[in-house]
Amino acid sequence: MHHLLVSPERGPVLVLGTLWPEYAAQYTALPTASGADPYSRAWELLAGRTLTVPDAFDVPALAAAEVLAEGGDRLLADALTRARTDGRMTQDLAGAPELFHRYRNAGPAAKAVLETAMDARRLGVGLHLPQAFLTDYLGQNDYDQLTGDWAERAYAELAEPVHGKPARALTPDPEHTRHWVLRI
C-alpha cells in the first residue's frame, strides 16, 4: 500500500476504512525519541487525514435520510423505524444492535468461536481465520456438553444474516476453504 500511495504515476488514491478511536490514537501518536516506531507507515497514512464519524445522525442528516427513504430507499426507511429517536442510523444499518444481541445470547460454542476470533484480531492475526483455530477456545465444562456437530452448528449460528441482510459476525472466507472472516 505504501508503494501505491507514494507513486505519483498511480494518480489520486483514496483509502477508506474505519478504525476504533483507541487505535487511531495509537497509530497517529508521535513516535518517542527512545525507540523504533512500529506504526510509522500507519502514521504516514493517517496523520491529519482522519474524520470522526458522530455516534448519531443529527436532525438535518435524519431529515435527509427521510427524504431518501420517501424516494424509495427501503433500507433507510427500515432503519429509520428503529433509529429515528436516537439517530443511530449507522449502527442500525451495520446490524450492530442485532450482532451485539446475538453475541450476548449465543450458545457456549458460538460465543467461544466468536471470542476466539475477536481475541485473534486484537492480537494482530489476519482477517482469514482457520476453522480449526477458531474451535479451540471452550472451557472444559462447555466442551463436555457438546455433541459431534457442535462446530458446524456454531458457525451456522454466527453466519446467519441480520434482518435478512448480510451483516454477520463471521462469514465463510470465499478465498480460503474452511476459513472464516470476523465481521465485527
Image (cartoon, helix red, strand yellow):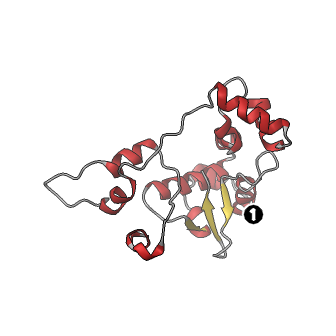
What's the residue at 29%, 48% (across, down)? 29
Q: Is residue 90 above or below residue 119?
A: above
Residue occupying the point 86% across, 42% down: 72
- Residue 143 versus residue 17: which sits nearer the camera? 17
Q: Is residue 107 above or below residue 13?
A: above
- Residue ID at (65%, 40%): 90
Q: Residue furthest top?
A: 85
Q: Relative to 72, does residue 128 appear above or below in the rendering?
A: below
Task: Locate residue 115, reporting x and y percent.
Answer: 56, 51
Viewer-side residue, 148 vs 38: 38
Q: Is residue 93 left or right of residue 31?
A: right
Res 65 quadrant in image: top right
Would you name the residue on which mark 1 appears?
A: 149
Assign a secondary structure to mark 1: loop
**Residue 165 screen position, x and y as percent:** 78, 51
Q: Is residue 78 visible?
A: no
Q: Is residue 160 left or right of residue 31?
A: right
Q: Position of residue 167 (x, y in %)?
A: 71, 51
